[in-house]
Image: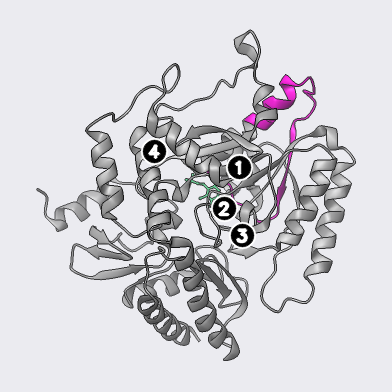
Amino acid sequence: MMSARDLREFDAHHLWHPFTQAQTAAAPILIKEAAGAWLSAADGIKYLDLISSWWVNLHGHAHPKIAHAIAEQAAKLEQVIFAGFTHEPAIELARRILAQLPASLARLFYSDNGSTAVEVALKIAFQFWRNSGEAGRKRFIAFEGGYHGDTIGAMSAGRTSGFYFPFEDLMFDVDIVPFPATWDGDENVEAREAETLASLDRLLQNARSYAAAIIEPLVQGAGGMRMCRPQFLSAMAKRLRSANVPLIFDEVMTGFGRTGALFACIKSGVEPDILCCAKGITGGFLPLAATITTERIYQAFLGNGIENAFLHGHSYTANPLGCAAGLASLDIFESEDVLSRIAGIEQVHRAHVSAMAKQGEIQRVRILGSIAAFDFAEGSAYGSGLSQILRDLALKEGLVLRPLGSTLYIMPPYCITDAELGAAYTGIRRILSQLR
Ligand SMILES: *Cc1c(COP(=O)(O)O)cnc(C)c1O
C-alpha cells in the first residue's frame, strides 16, 4: 500500500482533475473515507460536505443500505449488454421511477451521466421530427445561463453558462431566451417573465424550425442556483405545447428530492415531453442516468427497418449495480421519510439565511427544498479570486463549499442534522465576515 504522501505525489504527477487550473490550485485533499454528511481526510481532518459531492449524494456517504444492495447485486449479476438483453434491476428501477412521474412519461432510456442524459434527449427530439417527416426541425431553444453538461450537444444547449469559451467553434447554433431569475422580495419578476415569454413568442413564429426547447426547471444549477417561478414554467410550457415544440426538462440536478418534491415537474405541476435525470439517481454511489419520454415520441421510432430506430447506446447502459443502488435509494426515501426531512432542511435554511439577509450580510436570497443560495458579492466570475478565497476559508472551517461566482449555495445530503446545518451556518457567517 502506498503512503498518503506517495499517493499525493503520484496524483500531482499523473492525474488530471476536472474544472481545475492545476498550476495555481492547491493540492487536492486526499479523502480516505466518508460517512453521513462527513468526509474524512487522510490527515485526520473531517469536512462537512455541504455540496453533496457535486450534488450527487442524497442520503449520506457510504449509506449501509445502498452499499449492501450494490454488494449483493455484484455477487449476482454485475453487468450484461442491454441490447437484446434485459434484467430485473433495470425493469424494477424504471417501474419505480415512472410510478412517481406524470403518466404521460412512459418510456425510459438509460445512460451513464447527466451529459449523456441530455445528449440522448436532444438526439431523440431531433430524430423524432426526422422520423415524423419534418426533417427541417433542426434547431433548439435554450435559456440564458443554462448548464446541461460537457459533451458537445450539452455544451451547445448550455453555451451561455460561461464555461465553454474554448469550444465555441465546435458547438451547434441554439436560440437563447432570457431566464427570468427571481429571489425573495423580487418585485420585477412579472416584467422579466413577460419579456422572456415575448422573446419565446417571437421564436415560435417559426415553430417548425425547432426540434425542442430545453430548460432546468425551477433552478438553474451551475448557472448560479438561479430560480424561476412555477407560474413561468407553466406559461412557457403552454406556449410550447400549442406550437407543438417538445419541452425537455433537464432534472439532472433538481431530480430526486432537491426541490422538496421527488422531481421539479411534480413540484411545479408542469409536464415535459422529455425528462433527464442523473446525479441523485443512485443516491450518489454510481454513475447512471435516464432520459424519459412519452409514448408518442417513442412510437415515431418504430418501423420495419433499422433506419427509424434510435442508434445510440453506451457500454454500461442500465448497469445492474447502478440500478440496484437506485432501488435502495428509493427504498430509503420511503423508509426514512426523506421528503419530510427535506422540508425540515428548508426551514433551517430559511431561519439562518433570513437572519443573515436582515443583517445586510447577503443579497438575493433563494431557497427551495434542500437548496439555499444567496449572493455574497457583486458580479464575480466562476473560479474568480473571491470565490476561491471563500472556498479556502471554508476548508479551514471544515466546510466543503464551492461558490458559483458571487453566489454561495448550500446543498447538503438529506441526512444532515439540524445541529450540523446550524453549525455550518455559524461557520459561513464567520467566513463572510472575514471577506468584508
Ligand atoms: C451536472 C449537470 C449536468 C451534467 O451532468 P454530468 O453527470 O456532470 O455529466 C447536466 N445538467 C444539469 C442541470 C446538471 O446540473
CB within 8 Å, label 4 to label 3: no
Q: Earlier in the sequence, mark 2 or mark 1?
A: 2
Q: Earlier in the sequence, mark 2 or mark 4?
A: 2
Q: Earlier in the sequence, mark 1 or mark 4?
A: 1
In this rendering, the label closer to the viewer, 3 or 1: 1
Picture coordinates of residue 125 (x, y %)? 68, 32
Asked whether, in this view, residue 77 is left or right of residue 221, the answer is left
Give the CA separation, mark 3 to mark 2.
Answer: 12 Å
| Dot 1 amino acid type | Leu
CB within 8 Å, label 1 to label 4: no
In this rendering, the label closer to the viewer, 2 or 1: 2
The residue singled out by tag 3 in the image is 219
Give the CA separation, mark 2 to mark 1.
Answer: 10 Å
CB within 8 Å, label 2 to label 1: yes
The residue singled out by tag 4 in the image is 323
The residue singled out by tag 1 in the image is 275
**Magenta-drawn segment:** 124-151
Question: Disc number at residue 416?
Answer: none
- Which residue is located at x 47 percent, y 41 percent? 113
Q: Earlier in the sequence, mark 3 or mark 2?
A: 3
| Dot 3 amino acid type | Val
Q: Residue furthest top?
A: 304
Q: How crowded is mark 4: few (under 14 residues within 10 Å), some or many (20 or more)?
A: many
Residue 9, placed above or below residue 417: above
Numbered label tally: 4
| Dot 2 amino acid type | Phe
Q: Which residue lies furthest to the front in this view?
A: 335
